[in-house]
Image (cartoon, grey):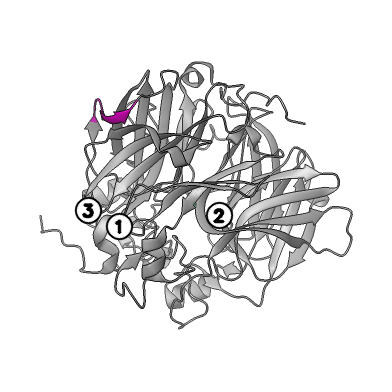
């Protein structure tokens, strides 16, 4: 055994410092409020931790081995559990006692001991599909975990049905069809053009599968769907394996390419795909999409340039602050024949990790919940700081590493109908994880329900769980629990209602009363 040291780098300081602890807390302490009694189920969230410092030393903040977190709600009582995702990478490194991988997704830097092992980190999202809780990261296939113990059950290829080598971290439920939609990008390996779209029924059978070529190999982190279509954006964060080999960086920003949007017809073929071209914008996360006549409204957190800073603009160039993302609407008119799309609406604020009432995915909708940077973060990092920056701030607060782990953030909601913003701050030096909406009842109106939020108290080294009235965030939590341990920041997660474990039917996936 040799001692374990992490480099003294900003990445490993503050809230982002490695935690490396698996926690079990049987009953969280209720600090204030009255918990809703009908909120029964499990909330899974996934984020990275640091099993070991990478071979490269420094790293990007979105890297790190996957830790899955579960909050189990039972008539007001809540338990918490976190466990490593013991995938091939984790187990091989555990055996070696050190990291076997280098820079983010760079397979050329692998230790020979890992030559046959996927570098997949399983650190991004969790979804219930095919009767399993699946842990997702776009560089590998899902890993199934036990829904109660979180024990890792193994890599899951939908019983051999999925031929893509990897699936997206942003799989989504279609609330009307009660299906799961997802895709593989660079689906036949790093740098390949292969895109594979899948739709699964509740048992994991493939209902729809469309393979097609991307215009270039690059990042496709998220997507959207409507009742009849699926929308992908291809923006110029490019994977060029020769450049990866030379520079170490998996993506390079090459704005000479614009963003191309592909519209797939569900249950169609690759020949039905329509392509639309626009400027070199980019996005990490979509919000929703829906049809309006011949137009698809595609709502997303759009950056006018490179949305995430650590993917360098070009070989040898230094990273720059990313362009801030704002909630915008792209209109894609399928009757237009000039191959163009329009960016029509801007809803204002810089925000990240947005979610909606998932029962309205694919349909006209009204409410968006998200993280909004609050004034202390803005003062430190400039007026347009993105919470996904991942770079060391300049100016006031210089030297502080700003990312979703360390920046301050409030939870907010925007009403797309009125433009009103409903926001709640947990106070100075706090941030929140991506919120998740849970309806009060399966058939309650859009937005009528609860917003679940993990709150990091950065100065106090501890985390809390808040339940808010989703349509009145400003009123503060209706219940607030002390988790008892720090919860290292997570990226995404999903709620699984208790009855879904029995029926496999995604119980939130009732046909909304006003869905058209
Ligand atoms: Fe994401």
Left or right side of 20 for 470: right
Q: Which residues are magenta?
A: 25-33
Along the line of sight, the residue nearer the viewer: 376 or 292: 376
Element carrying mark 2: loop
Q: Is mark 1 within 8 Å of ligand 1?
A: no
Rendered image: mark on residue 96: 3
Q: Is mark 2 within 8 Å of ligand 1?
A: yes
Quadrant location of the C terminus?
A: top right
Element carrying mark 3: helix
Question: x, y (%) of residue 337?
Answer: 89, 61
Q: Is residue 420 visible?
A: yes
Rendered image: mark on residue 113: 1
Spatial separation of the CA atoms under disc 3 and disc 1: 8 Å
Mark in front: 3 vs 1: 3
Question: x, y (%) of residue 22?
Answer: 24, 39
Rendered image: mark on residue 221: 2
Position of residue 136 relative to residue 458, above or below, is: above
Q: Is residue 219 visible?
A: no
Quadrant location of the N terminus?
A: bottom left
Disc 3, disc 1: CB below 8 Å?
yes
Position of residue 241 relative to residue 49, above or below, is: below
Residue shown at the point (50%, 54%) measured from the top left: 352
Along the line of sight, the residue nearer the viewer: 300 or 423: 423
The image quadrant of residue 355 is top right
Mark in front: 3 vs 2: 2
Residue 339 belongs to the span the image colors magenta? no
Position of residue 244 relative to residue 336, above or below, is: below
Disc 3, disc 2: CB below 8 Å?
no
Along the line of sight, the residue nearer the viewer: 316 or 33: 33
Residue 31 belongs to the span the image colors magenta? yes
Element carrying mark 1: helix
Question: x, y (%) of residue 81?
Answer: 29, 33
């Amino acid at each position: 055994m040799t001692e374990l040291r992490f480099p003294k780098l900003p990445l490993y300081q503050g809230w982002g410092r490695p935690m490396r602890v698996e926690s079990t807390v049987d009953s969280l302490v209720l600090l204030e409020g009255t918990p809703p009694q009908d909120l029964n189920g499990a909330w899974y969230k996934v984020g990275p931790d640091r099993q070991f410092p990478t071979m490269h030393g420094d790293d990007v903040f979105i890297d790190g081995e996957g830790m899955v977190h579960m909050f189990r709600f039972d008539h007001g009582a809540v338990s918490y559990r976190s466990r490593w995702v013991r995938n091939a990478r984790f187990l091989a490194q555990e055996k070696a006692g050190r990291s076997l991988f280098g820079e983010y997704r760079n397979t050329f830097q692998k230790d020979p001991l890992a030559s046959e092992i996927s570098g997949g980190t399983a650190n991004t999202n969790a979804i219930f599909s095919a009767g399993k809780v699946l842990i997702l990261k776009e560089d590998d296939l899902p890993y199934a975990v036990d829904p109660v113990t979180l024990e890792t059950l193994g890599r899951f290829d939908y019983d051999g049905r999925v031929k893509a080598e990897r699936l997206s971290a942003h799989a989504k439920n279609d609330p009307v069809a009660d299906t799961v939609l997802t895709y593989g990008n660079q689906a036949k390996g790093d740098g390949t053009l292969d895109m594979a779209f899948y739709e699964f029924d509740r048992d994991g059978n493939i209902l729809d599968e469309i393979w097609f070529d991307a215009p270039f190999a690059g990042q496709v982190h998220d997507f959207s769907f409507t009742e009849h279509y699926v929308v992908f954006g291809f923006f110029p964060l490019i994977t060029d394996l020769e450049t990866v080999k030379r520079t170490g960086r998996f993506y390079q920003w090459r704005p000479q390419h614009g963003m191309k949007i592909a519209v797939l017809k569900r249950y169609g073929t690759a020949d039905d795909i329509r392509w639309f071209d626009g400027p070199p914008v980019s996005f990490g996360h979509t919000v929703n999409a829906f049809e309006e006549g011949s137009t698809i409204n595609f709502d997303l957190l759009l950056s006018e340039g490179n949305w995430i800073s650590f993917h360098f603009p070009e070989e040898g160039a230094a990273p720059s602050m990313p362009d801030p993302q704002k909630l915008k609407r792209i209109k894609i008119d399928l009757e237009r024949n000039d191959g163009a799309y329009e960016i029509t609406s801007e809803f204002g604020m810089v925000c990240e990790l947005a979610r909606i009432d998932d029962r309205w995915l694919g349909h006209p909708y009204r409410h968006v919940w998200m993280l909004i940077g609050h004034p202390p973060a803005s003062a430190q990092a400039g007026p347009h700081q993105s919470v996904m920056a991942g770079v060391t701030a300049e100016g006031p607060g210089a030297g502080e590493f700003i990312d979703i782990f360390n920046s301050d953030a409030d939870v907010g909601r925007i009403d797309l109908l009125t433009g009103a913003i409903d926001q709640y701050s947990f106070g100075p030096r706090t941030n929140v994880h991506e919120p998740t909406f849970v309806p009060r009842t399966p058939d309650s109106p859009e937005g009528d329900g609860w917003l679940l939020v993990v709150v990091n108290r950065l100065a106090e080294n501890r985390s809390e769980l808040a339940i808010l009235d989703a349509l009145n965030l400003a009123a503060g939590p209706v219940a607030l629990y002390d988790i008892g341990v720090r919860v290292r920041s997570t990226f995404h997660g999903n709620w699984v209602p208790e009855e879904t474990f029995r029926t496999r039917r995604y119980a939130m996936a009732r046909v909304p009363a006003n869905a058209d």
